[in-house]
Image (cartoon, grey):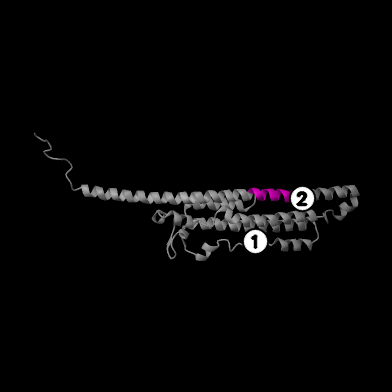
């Protein structure tokens, strides 16, 4: 499983159960929360790979660089979406500060609550992720297809093995490299599906939590009103005197 999944799930759990600090209003972040995420440049990585000898070591390095580029970008996009959902102050008016995760400011209109998570829908980042994934898939397959197992055998192996044995060893390595690429592509698709699903659930959980906090605030106010009413009756007699009524 790609490395950014555990970090996202951990951040989700910590945010929902521990609460989130208030953030000031930011008009720029409101416009584009993903502006800080730079998409991976697979064309540059392709050029670097083409200039190298296609050894097992160079392929391992190129494969890791591609992983870091794609998963780092996906992590940035998803983290930005999670952060924006959890910044309750986005639902407030400009100049206000607050945290919708607390009862004191949770009772807002439906429109303002929707504004709090506007732009974080899975469909908002899906095109960006799919575009990066397509480039990632093409790059991984190019790495695998152009790998020629150069330098696979050291000099002792070159002298000891027959020509057919050398071909078999090189062929096994090429097949393993290609299988690795397809497995990484498959796991990236699974991770994408899990991540977008968790983002959807988080948005629903955030809205439900804010509404619950509003109910809590209303219950607190109800308790206060009951206390005030009780105090009004404390000075009245506890029982009626001469309450019998004669015809």
Which residue is located at x 46 percent, y 60 percent? 89
Residue 113 visible in the shown view = yes
Residue 115 x/y as whole percent: 48, 57
Q: Do the residues labelled 1 and 2 touch (CB within 8 Å)?
A: no
Check disc 2 and report its element: helix, strand or loop: helix
Left or right: 210 as drawn, with respect to 34 = left
Image quarter for residue 65?
bottom right
Residue 39: image tag: 1
In three-dimensional space, the C-alpha distance between marks 1 and 2, rounded to whole angstroms, equals: 25 Å
Q: Does the magenta stretch include residue 185?
A: yes
Residue corresponding to mark 2? 178
Left or right: 166 as drawn, with respect to 128 = right
Image quarter for residue 79?
bottom right
Which residue is located at x 39 percent, y 49 percent? 215
Magenta segment boundaries in residue numbering? 179-190
Residue 13 visible in the shown view = no
Which residue is located at x 42 percent, y 49 percent? 212
Nearer the observer, 221 or 119: 119
Outermost residue toward the left?
247
Which residue is located at x 72 percent, y 62 percent? 43
Q: Does the magenta stretch include residue 26?
A: no
Name the chief secondary structure element in magenta. Answer: helix
Label located before the other in sequence (1 or 2): 1
Nearer the observer, 60 or 121: 121
Left or right: 117 as drawn, with respect to 146 = left
Nearer the observer, 149 or 89: 89
């Amino acid at each position: 499983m790609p490395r950014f999944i555990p970090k996202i799930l951990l951040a989700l759990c910590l945010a929902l159960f521990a609460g989130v600090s208030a953030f000031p209003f930011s008009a720029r972040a409101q416009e584009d929360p993903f502006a800080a995420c730079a998409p991976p440049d697979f064309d540059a990585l392709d050029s670097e790979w083409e200039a190298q000898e296609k050894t097992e070591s160079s392929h391992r390095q190129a494969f890791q660089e591609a992983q870091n580029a794609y998963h780092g970008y996906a992590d940035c996009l998803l983290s930005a979406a999670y952060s924006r959902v959890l910044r309750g102050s986005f639902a407030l008016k400009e100049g206000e500060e607050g945290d919708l995760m607390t009862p004191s400011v949770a009772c807002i209109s439906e429109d303002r609550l929707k504004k709090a998570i506007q732009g974080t829908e899975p469909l908002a980042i899906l095109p960006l992720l799919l575009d990066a994934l397509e480039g990632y898939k093409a790059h991984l397959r190019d790495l695998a297809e152009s790998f020629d197992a150069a330098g696979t055998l050291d000099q002792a192996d070159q002298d000891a093995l027959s020509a057919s044995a050398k071909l078999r060893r090189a062929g096994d390595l090429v097949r393993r490299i290609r299988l690795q690429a397809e497995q990484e592509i498959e796991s990236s698709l699974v991770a994408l599906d899990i991540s977008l699903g968790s983002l959807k659930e988080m948005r629903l959980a955030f809205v439900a939590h804010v509404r619950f906090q509003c109910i809590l605030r209303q219950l607190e106010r109800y308790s206060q009103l009951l206390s005030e009413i009780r105090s009004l009756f404390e000075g009245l007699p506890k029982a009626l005197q001469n309450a019998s009524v004669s015809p």
